Image (cartoon, coloured by chain):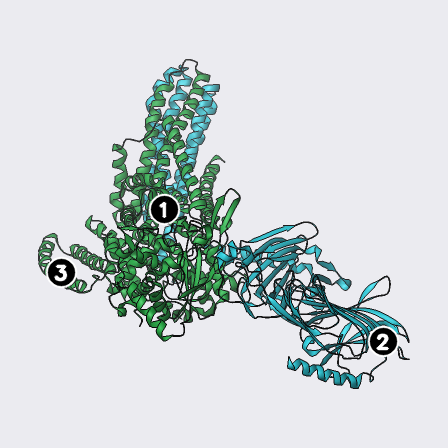
Amino acid sequence: MATSKVEGSSSLRHAFGGVLSVFILLLIGVVAFSIRLFSVIKYESVIHEFDPYFNYRVTQFLSKNGIYDFWNWFDDRTWYPLGRVIGGTVYPGLTLTAGTMWKLANSLNIPLSVETVCVFTAPIFSAFAAWATYLLTKEVKGPGAGITAAAILAMVPSYISRSVAGSYDNEAVAIFALIFTFYLYIKTLNTGSLFYATLNSLAYFYMVCSWGGYTFIINLIPMHVLLCIVTGRYSSRLYIAYAPLVVLGTLLAALVPVVGFNAVMTSEHFGSFLVFIIIHVVALVYYIKGILTPRLFKVATTLVLTVGIAVCAVVVAILVALVASSPTKGWSGRSLSLLDPTYASKYIPIIASVSEHQPPTWPSYFMDINVLAFLVPAGIVACFLPLSDASSFAVLYLVTSVYFSGVMVRLMLVLAPAACIMSGIALSEAFGVLTRSMKFHITKYFECSHTEAPAKLGESTSTESSAPLENMTKSDTTEKPEVARKEKVARRKQKKEKELTENAHVKPVSAKKEKRPLVLPLEASIVSVFLLIVLGGLYVLHCVWAAAEAYSAPSIVLTSHSHDGLHVFDDFREAYAWLRHNTEVDDKVASWWDYGYQTTAMANRTVIVDNNTWNNTHIATVGTAMSSPEKAAWEIFNSLDVKYVLVVFGGLVGYPSDDINKFLWMVRIGGGVFPHIKEADYLKDGQYRVDAQATHTMLNCLMYKLSYYRFVETDGKGFDRVRRYEIGKKHFKLTHFEEVFTTHHWMVRIYKLKPQKNRIRGKSRKSKLGSKSTSSKSGGMTHKNPWN
Amino acid sequence: MDRRLQFAFVLLCLGLLSSTARSDLVVSKAERLVDLNSHIVRVLSKLKVENEGPDDVSEVLLALPDAQAKNLAAIRTFYSDGKLGFVLPTEPIEPKGMPSDVTYYSIALPKKLGKGKTVSLDVLSIFTRSLKPFPEEITQAESQLVVYTDNMYYTSPYPVKYQSLVFRLPGRVESYTKYPKVELVKSELRYGPFEMQPAFSYSPVVVHFENNNPFAVANELVREIEISHWGNVRVTEQYTISHGGASLKNGFSRIEYQARPYMRGASSFRVLIAKLPARAHSVYYRDEIGNISTSHFWGDSQRTQLEIEPRFPIFGGWKTTFTIGYSLPLHDFLFEADGGKRVLNMTFGCPLDEVLVEKHIVKVVLPEGSKDITVATLFPTKQSEDVKYSHLDILGRPVVVLEKDNVVPEHNLYFQVYYKFNNISLLSEPMMLIVGIFLLFVACIVYMHTDLAISKTSSSYLEKLQWEEVQATVQHIKNIFDQYLAAHDKLESSLRDLSRSGDVQSCKAARKAADAQFKELAKELKPLLTFLQSCSQASSILPKIEELVTKEKEMQEKEMAKHTTVVDCFEKKLGGKDIESRIASQQQKLTSLKQEVESLLDSISEI
């Protein structure tokens, strides 16, 4: 009877553990999903920011016209008059995912709008990412660490910032794809199964579909393979994990139109091919080593080495020559700015102008990964005890992502999963040690009372008899957990390296003898556990705060709290709605490229430039127009068929990211292509200002005029609440533009190009002369208007 | 203008010709009140009709010039017989022998009108698009002027003895048709009285006046009323609203709109008020790019009011779209009707104040499985049927579509939809979900318990099978060892009992029993071990299990030895201390062995 009870309880314990961990994972998924709903609850279910609007528009097109039209979609609503081939220039993973989800829901007659699906794609995939983290960390360091890491990832602020409900961007699904690809790689590495290797290539394909960050995978995995080879950890499992990935993965990647032949032509992928060659050489060497006698092998080695080095030198020389012949050395601008952080600011202002391409500051690390920054080193230490293939991968992932996050604030997102995995490992190891010591102390206490009881009852004298017993049990039990752990590790290895089983099962025996156990005093461990729980609690508090306050604003609706309650600034949509309903369908709207995606998606009007900054010249043209005087700007815009000009102005309500603050980038980008625009003309003693001391050029450029037209009439002084001073030129009239709409808080102002006046002979010549004399700085008129 | 004159001329001629041709009714008094306050023109004609002929008359004809008739949105005749007032049916007809260019409506009298009797009728006719903005384009600062044209005399197929015409105006009058009998008092322009006019008298009258009331026109309104028998009526209204007045020229200046109230744009409108049914809840107000945050909502048990502000003020010629949605409790609108039918009783029109709806579409989405659908409305509408699929529908929900052009607030009347519905159908969707999830679990169970291997002879498959067998065996072995441990525990407890009670015999018996059990278990263990030895797959675990077996054997020996020692000691009546010292070394070994065995078991169980 007792035996069956014991048996039952152990299997029940296992089943209970399984159910519990499934339940915990489910809850983690729920947390990951629901913590991202603050934006919907506090604001509304709406697409956020800029890029998501484009993705939303593409998804709408996809759901309306189907996949084949999508691949062939030439979008004439943007980059007028060039247009853009959307199907071939967009990473389709996100849109295809959301489109499929929408289709699935609709085929079941669940009436979800495309917008709803898009809004909730990111939270759903965050839950998936948390589960993928569990799988990955489980492969690295066991299920305990896996669950901890999944819980941490579910609410890491860095990831939340990119995946709140409504933030419908590539990163939302790409992080899941990234972690899942890594998981499958590690799984393949641990099992040596070709099945997982194939799945790995498919996951990699999904990643390539979703995000340009796939180059991180195709560089990190080869680095890890190289590391394994160099440290003498080559095995057939490594080969199976890597070779199919390169072959299948590259073939699949080339299927994605936006990648295409880049998968074999650009330098980002060369590393993987090089390692592919190396792993084959190494495999060959191992094979030959197996069939040759050691002496013969030595001879063969020297022979091959001499020939091999010669061949390698030639190949390397050819490669270098090929790469060097291309102007960017075969690297794309963004990748280059990763390798050389100063590259962008030197050569490509358009990349440097984006705030998320700037290097992060220390506070942003604390903001984005919070306490994980302190747990990560502990995790690294834990990964080295003992170092396995999987844990070395985790360490390598962390180190590289730390570097990349240091270059570009956007790549903090790649660091987040690595930091979560490391912290998960650290926390779970710490909890393991602490609870083990607590358990030991408690069981010791119980055993004490057990042994004492009979002694007291039976023989009244044997009070101190328990003392030796106690010591004895202590030494034994202390030995036990540590031994068990060592054994566990060894066993895991055993499982992985089936060919090395003979060695492995010798190990625990030897380890048992030498290792002294790590047991902390009861009080210390209780206090540490308490402190760790407090630390975790602080992390949770910070995450909830970050999710609720810092990262949930949709940025198209702004709110402010004043003494009389919440104040909503919905000016952007006011302007877009006005454009949508009260202009002709084919009117062209010019604005700085930031608002391009929103204008096409929300106002459904053709724009000149948008956030897909593929044509620098075109953007420079708009920048030039904005920084030119009214007449020249009118000519540029007129030549581009523009009917409305949209500017964002924050001076009335103090909205800092308005066009005046971005204006210097327009000058720089414009000046980069049209040299008659000189940054120095807009700066007074190297300072950018629009007050009375500003330069004449500045106060006469189109951007200034459109922003401040009749602004002085609001308060009589023209006090700009963003710049915190009175503007330089207060009273002026527009000659070539007319105001057609300004939103409630003046945040968006829309002007219409006036039609050309009838020419009066004498007058026109006079005004022409006048304009020439004022804009004497222009070298040649041909430069001024690039479209004439 | 000349067309109008021409028309007047034709009318006059025809009138002269036919005035005697038809019946002997005479309008003894016609007082017209034309309300020009909003952009919907309401003309209330108070008529006294007298029968001068010999025959009883059962119908009275009304006439409207075609130019006005095409703008007519509704016509209604009220009749009062002293106590009760009711609406008389007013239908368009085409009588013979009457002048064309005129549309006729016939009022069926409740009882025949005898010779020399009179009847009082109040005819309310509502016209849309009758106010023409003039000038057609204005700037933001100007106020809107409109022109209204009408007949100075009451257009009637009967001679009119006495009549007057009053225009009620919202504001300043720019100009009006001068006539001897006209006076302008405050905001009222009075023409008349005129006496003894023949039938179809015509003289144009034109009023040019200021009207800044909102000219809100809904170009299209789709009202979807979705009934859920779980207790909810969901109403979704999609509006395309535009300003039907004079269009704006020279752009919109926010500074003037905000800073100078007198130049605010008097002709524009900023707010629309929707009067929703009582107990409306879950209200939303949005457009295709998201929520519109400018709205106010309040309500009590009698009514609910929603004040909505479009994203931008609507000036002449501007347009916007938005959607309002709200939920209503089902029991306020759905009732049981005769013959087991259900009847939905809802208002037809648009809840917004003073909005003209050019194209009004009402869709009533009935629950899935509704049958025998009939609709009753107080005015003619175009009816069609449709099917809507939502929320896991299979057959789809029947949809009744009612269409009507030129809907004015006076059309805000109740209409009824009768249908049959079986309450069992309510459960079909939950049942479907339950069955679906159940089938999913069944599929999972089936998948877990069936062997889906294609090739039953492949080496990997066989290996897998063997591995499973090995696992089962290991589990079995583990169980045996658990029993071993339990037996050890029993022995220990017997020793404890001994120290308490001193019952040597029972202790010996316990030892015997344990010994027997050990032998039994060893017997059981043997075939399992041989199986593991024969398996290639078990090679990784085998050493551990062998170690376990040896450890266990050792432990048994030690345990027995200890047991016998203690029992012997007891038999010799030795003191507790002596016993302790004797068995101390054995005890130590035993504990360490036990630890080892347990840790080995743990490690095995993890495989």
Quote the CA–CA distance across marks 1 and 3: 40 Å
Residue tagged 2:
B58
Q: Mark 1 vs mark 3: same chain?
A: yes
Mark 1 or 3 closer to N-term? Answer: 1
Q: Mark 2 lies on which chain?
A: B
Q: Which x, y percent locates residue A680?
A: 26, 55
| Mark 2: amino acid | Ser
Residue B195: quarter of image:
bottom right
Q: Is residue A393 above or below residue A316?
A: above
- Viewer-proximal residue among A393 and A243: A393
Asked whether the viewer can see residue A50, the reply is no
| Residue plotted at (25% across, 47% down) | A500
| Mark 3: amino acid | Cys
Q: Which x, y percent locates residue A536?
A: 40, 38
Quote the CA–CA distance across marks 2 and 1: 93 Å
Q: Which x, y percent locates residue A621?
A: 32, 65
Q: Given contact means CB atoms under 8 Å apart, are the residues at marks 2 and 1 in contact? A: no
Residue tagged 3:
A312
Q: Given contact means CB atoms under 8 Å apart, are the residues at marks 1 and 3 in contact? A: no
Chain coloured green in this rendering: A
| Residue plotted at (84% across, 62% down) | B84
| Mark 1: amino acid | Lys
SS at mark 2 in the image: strand
| Side (left or right) of A210 relative to B63 | left
Residue B197: quarter of image:
bottom right
Q: Is residue A536 above or below residue B285?
A: above
Crowd tier of the residue under label 2, counting other residues whose Cα lies within 10 Å: few below 14, some 14–19, many 20 or above = some
Chain coloured cyan in this rendering: B
| Side (left or right) of B443 relative to B88 | left
Quote the CA–CA distance across marks 2 and 3: 112 Å
Of labels 2 and 3, the one closer to you? 2
Of labels 2 and 1, the one closer to you? 2
